[in-house]
Amino acid sequence: MVRSISLLVESPLSVLAQAMREVPTETKKFIGSETKKAAQPIWFDELKGRALSRVQQRVLVDSARVSATARNVTLKSGAVGKLRSGTPVIALSSAAEFGMSPQKQITQRSKKGKTYTRKAGPTFGAPRRSGNVVYPAANDSIPRFASLWIQTAHRALHDAAEKG
């Protein structure tokens, strides 16, 4: 299960989230862009360190993205792009993350148009409910992103207060 952080408890994160309501729009945009710049390499490295196969590398790591706003950081993987074969990454992302039974029958079509079935084989690894790459990486990196967001916002608010 992916970790989440509650803002119901009094913490620096909840105080900052409440304070962000009063921050000017330009400062919020700056906080979002700076958070994204710093978060993208962290997310990419977390995924890269957990990908064990070439399929996981191409499908989950190479399609990793981070989007950040003044109030939220969204981690994405396995949704954008195509493989060299032309297969959309999203078609394989679930199997690359959660595995697939080697005995599962897959129906395919040849270049000539003939339909045939084959077994999945060991390409995606054994099924794993908790995920192999993205979910464990998100679980471990969410506290880092929360800390990063607090530091970035604190620095940006301090700079904005000094300027004007």
Image: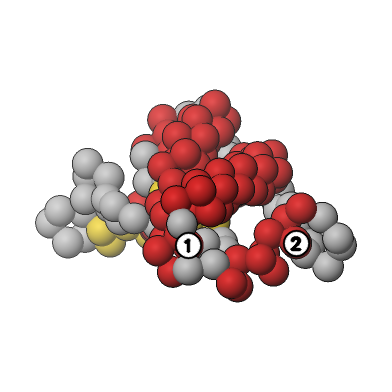
Q: Position of residue 93 (x, y in %)?
A: 46, 52
Q: Which residue is mark 1?
A: 28
Q: Position of residue 142 (x, y in %)?
A: 66, 46
| In-front residue for pair 134/53 | 134
Q: Position of residue 16 (x, y in %)?
A: 68, 59
Which type of secondary structure does the marked residue at label 1 adopt? helix
Few, some or many residues within 10 Å of mark 1 (<14, 14–19, 20+)? many
Judged left or right of residue 145, residue 74 is left
- In the rendered image, the residue lying farthest to the right is 9
| In-front residue for pair 38/19 | 19
Identify which amino acid the numbered label 1 is placed on.
Lys
Few, some or many residues within 10 Å of mark 2 (<14, 14–19, 20+)? some
Judged left or right of residue 4, residue 61 is left
Q: Residue at x 59, y 72 (%)?
A: 22
Q: Which corner quadrant of the image does residue 54 belong to?
A: top left
Q: Which residue is mark 2?
A: 14
| In-front residue for pair 159/82 | 159
Judged left or right of residue 29, residue 126 is right
Residue 38 seen anywhere in this rendered image of the structure: yes
Mark closer to the chain start, 1 or 2: 2
Identify which amino acid the numbered label 2 is placed on.
Ser
Which type of secondary structure does the marked residue at label 2 adopt? helix
